[in-house]
Image (spheres, rainbow, N blue to C red):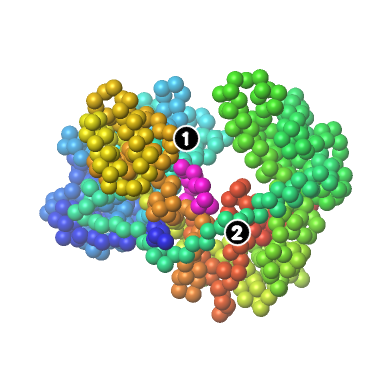
């Protein structure tokens, strides 16, 4: 199997080149107001500052494009002008590695033209793409960006930062005294980065942006990677990574080399069998055996119409009957339709009303009218049949998405039914052939409570829950006994404990999140997709002759090669370009495309199409996003969970975060025995789960208990 790249980096600095090209200053201030470093532009009047990087204290590093003698003059100028500042020239070898890397990366967005008279420094590296912009007409009112940051432990991270035009100030609720202190930026279309606005610059409000989200706005989501085309690729996070890594390899090649740390000893667990059939049967059996009530807690015209349509959809698609005007009673199943938080008029969250239902052992799941009705569309069979074939196909696809969401609701009700009945039924726990009990623990870090939830599972699948907290004198000592595993030294900057696993022998493993991620081969994928955009012109007769030679030299698929030549002969033009080649129709489409692509690549170095989802390519390029992958790391296990490798799509929504399983107090690692508990599709729809699924049961149990005994 191939290596897996992570976002932890290995760095080699070329200090001789760095020292001959730049000088570095460390500026400290006794006053916070100098934190923004804008005074550098006022003093220097020319773009000699390449980048700055802030430390945690009121100090920052400055990289200047000058000789050391000129840097001495800058130091004198700063000290003379500002009494509260101290400045020293510092060798790059003495700067912390992560700060030096960040200085070099930040310099990629600095002004390079001698015609600019200012530096426009933000202290950070922001990247954006026009496809991410939010507009009203032609006016851009919001710019989502990716910020790239190097952490102290040399992890290269990206995070989304959203900038909003100050023309939208009324929607941001920022006090005047705070508003005028916020850094202001504008978009530089030359390199897709944000530039710091200087006080001397005059620009319209709609062109000035601050890092703020408007009230009630949805969280910005940018897919990790879409490799269906070059255009889709550059609109994903991968496009930003490709841009940054390419710029590092070109603009910074004399100063730094960056390689990603890789897992050379990774082990794959490829799951082909899941619990899907078992789960589907369980859902069907439960909803056939019990009455299901849809409670409309919104009670207006829109909610009444939605309830009727939702009910008809379930009847048609899943043969499930919903009772719309009934009061749930013990033994029933319940779906509650409520307003989302933005539309709830009273202070009391409608969600907490479900406590009365759970107290009667009625498993209940909530859907919000505003979100659910706007996100999903439900088309009835009669409506679909009245449309043309093309429209029918579109509506059927929308129904497929809606049906997946509905099944997710039903699955959640089954899980709650399991919890109320203290038995796992959504999957066949007995099939794991465990001989002894397992115990799982999850710490609830909600600000209003500090609890640890425990779940013991017997070999037969029986559940036994317990909650520990400081408010109970009888469990406080036991709480303290386990709380320590969620605190330092176990919890640190590189590891955040999420849960505990305890075996029959009393061995404890901590499972938690690291700050590292597995990453796809951004550069390889981007470079391959760029090749798909390059045009070419080939003589048709020469190309046919080449294919004939292939046929003579290769016994593989002669009839497919004959078909390719036949299709080429049908073209009237003497020259074949990319558009023409892509338009060819073969009797065996997949084989024809692949073989024609192979001929062009081998003979002409032309990539017509990238078959990136082929078995060999998908592991070479996307090993970071498929299957369960793990490796031994000292006495622990590191792992991540991706999509099932069979039939991967042309995009991945998010990174696979790397988790670690750490044994404590001389316990062995017990990861291998529980890996099957992640091969379920009822935590993540139609996908593997990133944690053993019993943790899902504990979290749901804690939520139910809060509804049963709400504290206001």
Residue 603 at what x, y percent from top left? 24, 43
Residue drawn where x is 81% and y is 41% of the image: 292
Residue 123 at what x, y percent from top left? 33, 47
Check residue 176 in the rendering and tell me which mark sits there, or answer none.
Answer: 1
In magenta stretch: residue 648: yes
Q: Looking at the rendering, which quadrant does residue 72 occupy? A: bottom left
Residue drawn where x is 72% and y is 44% of the image: 410
Magenta highlight: main SS? loop
Q: Is 496 placed left or right of 480 in the picture?
A: left
Q: Earlier in the sequence, mark 1 or mark 2?
A: 1
In this rendered view, identify the residue nearer to me: 427 or 701. Answer: 427
Q: Looking at the rendering, which quadrant does residue 475 occupy? A: bottom right
Residue range in magenta is 643-655
Q: Residue at label 2?
A: 678
Whether residue 275 can be seen here = yes
In magenta stretch: residue 159: no
* Distance between the alpha carbons at the discs numbered 1 and 2: 50 Å
Is disc 2 surrounded by few (<14), some (14 to 19) or many (20+) residues within 10 Å? Answer: many
Is disc 1 surrounded by few (<14), some (14 to 19) or many (20+) residues within 10 Å? Answer: few
Residue drawn where x is 86% and y is 48% of the image: 331
In this rendered view, identify the residue nearer to me: 81 or 101. Answer: 101
In this rendered view, identify the residue nearer to me: 581 or 12. Answer: 581
Check residue 147 in the rendering and tell me which mark sits there, or answer none.
Answer: none
Residue 486 at what x, y percent from top left? 58, 66
């Amino acid at each position: 199997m191939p290596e897996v790249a992570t976002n932890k980096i290995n760095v080699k600095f070329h200090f001789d080149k760095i020292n001959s090209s730049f000088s570095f200053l460390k500026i400290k201030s006794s006053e916070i107001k100098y934190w923004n470093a804008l005074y550098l532009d006022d003093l220097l009047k020319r773009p000699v500052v390449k980048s700055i990087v802030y430390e945690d204290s009121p100090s920052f590093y400055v990289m200047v494009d000058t000789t050391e003698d000129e840097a001495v003059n800058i130091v004198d100028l700063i000290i003379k002008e500002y009494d509260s500042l101290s400045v020293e020239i510092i060798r790059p070898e003495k700067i912390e590695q992560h700060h030096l890397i960040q200085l070099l990366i930040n310099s990629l967005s600095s002004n390079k033209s001698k015609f600019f008279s200012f530096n426009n420094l933000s202290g950070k590296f922001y990247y954006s793409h026009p496809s991410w912009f939010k507009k009203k007409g032609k006016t851009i009112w919001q710019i989502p960006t990716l910020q790239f940051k190097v952490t102290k432990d040399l992890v290269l991270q990206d995070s989304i930062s959203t900038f909003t035009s100050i023309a939208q100030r009324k929607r941001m609720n920022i006090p005047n005294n705070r508003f005028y202190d916020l850094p202001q930026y504008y978009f530089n279309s030359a390199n897709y980065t944000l530039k710091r606005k200087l006080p001397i610059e005059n620009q319209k409000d709609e062109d000035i942006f601050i890092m703020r989200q408007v009230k009630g706005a949805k969280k910005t989501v940018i897919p990790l990677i879409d490799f269906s085309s070059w255009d889709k690729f550059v609109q994903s996070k991968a496009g930003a990574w490709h841009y940054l890594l390419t710029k590092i390899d070109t603009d910074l090649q004399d100063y730094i080399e960056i390689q990603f740390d890789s897992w050379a000893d990774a082990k794959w667990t490829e799951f082909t069998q899941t619990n899907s059939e078992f789960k589907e049967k369980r859902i069907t059996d439960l909803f056939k055996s019990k009455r299901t009530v849809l409670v409309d807690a919104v009670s207006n015209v829109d909610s009444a119409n939605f309830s009727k349509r939702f009910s008809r959809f379930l009847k048609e698609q899943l043969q499930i009957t919903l009772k719309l005007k009934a009061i749930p009673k013990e033994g029933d199943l319940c779906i509650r339709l409520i307003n989302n938080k933005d539309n709830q008029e009273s202070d009391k969250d409608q969600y907490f009303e479900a406590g009365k239902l759970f107290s009667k052992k009625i498993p209940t799941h909530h859907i919000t009218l505003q979100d659910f009705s706007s996100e999903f569309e439900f088309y009835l069979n009669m409506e679909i049949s009245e449309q043309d074939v093309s429209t029918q196909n579109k509506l059927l696809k929308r129904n497929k998405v809606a049906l997946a969401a509905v099944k997710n609701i039903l699955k959640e009700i089954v899980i709650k039914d399991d919890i109320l009945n203290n038995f796992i039924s959504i999957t066949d726990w007995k099939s794991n052939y465990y001989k002894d009990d397992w115990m799982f623990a999850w710490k609830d870090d909600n600000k209003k409570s500090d609890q640890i939830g425990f779940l013991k599972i017997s070999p037969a699948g029986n559940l036994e829950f317990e909650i520990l907290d400081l408010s109970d004198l009888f469990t406080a000592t036991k709480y303290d006994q386990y709380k320590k595993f969620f605190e330092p030294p176990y919890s640190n900057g590189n590891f955040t404990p999420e849960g505990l696993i305890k075996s029959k022998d009393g061995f404890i493993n901590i499972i938690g999140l690291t700050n590292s991620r597995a990453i796809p081969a951004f550069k390889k994928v981007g470079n391959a997709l760029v090749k798909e955009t390059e045009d070419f012109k080939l003589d048709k007769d020469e190309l046919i002759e080449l294919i004939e030679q292939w046929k003579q030299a290769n016994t593989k698929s002669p009839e497919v090669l004959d078909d390719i030549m036949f299709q080429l002969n049908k073209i009237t033009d003497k020259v074949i370009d990319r558009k023409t080649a892509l338009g060819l129709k073969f009797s065996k489409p997949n084989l024809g495309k692949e073989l024609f692509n192979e001929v062009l690549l081998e003979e002409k170095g032309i990539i017509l199409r990238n078959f990136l989802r082929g078995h060999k390519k998908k592991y070479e390029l996307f090993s970071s996003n498929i299957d369960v992958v793990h490796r031994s790391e000292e006495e622990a296990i590191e792992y991540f969970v991706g999509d099932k490798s069979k039939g991967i799509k042309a995009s991945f929504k998010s990174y696979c975060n790397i988790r670690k399983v750490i044994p404590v107090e001389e316990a062995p690692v017990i990861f291998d025995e529980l890996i099957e508990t992640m091969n379920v599709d009822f935590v993540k729809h139609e996908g593997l789960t990133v944690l053993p699924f019993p943790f899902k049961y504990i979290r749901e149990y804690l939520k139910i208990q809060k509804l049963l005994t709400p504290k206001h």
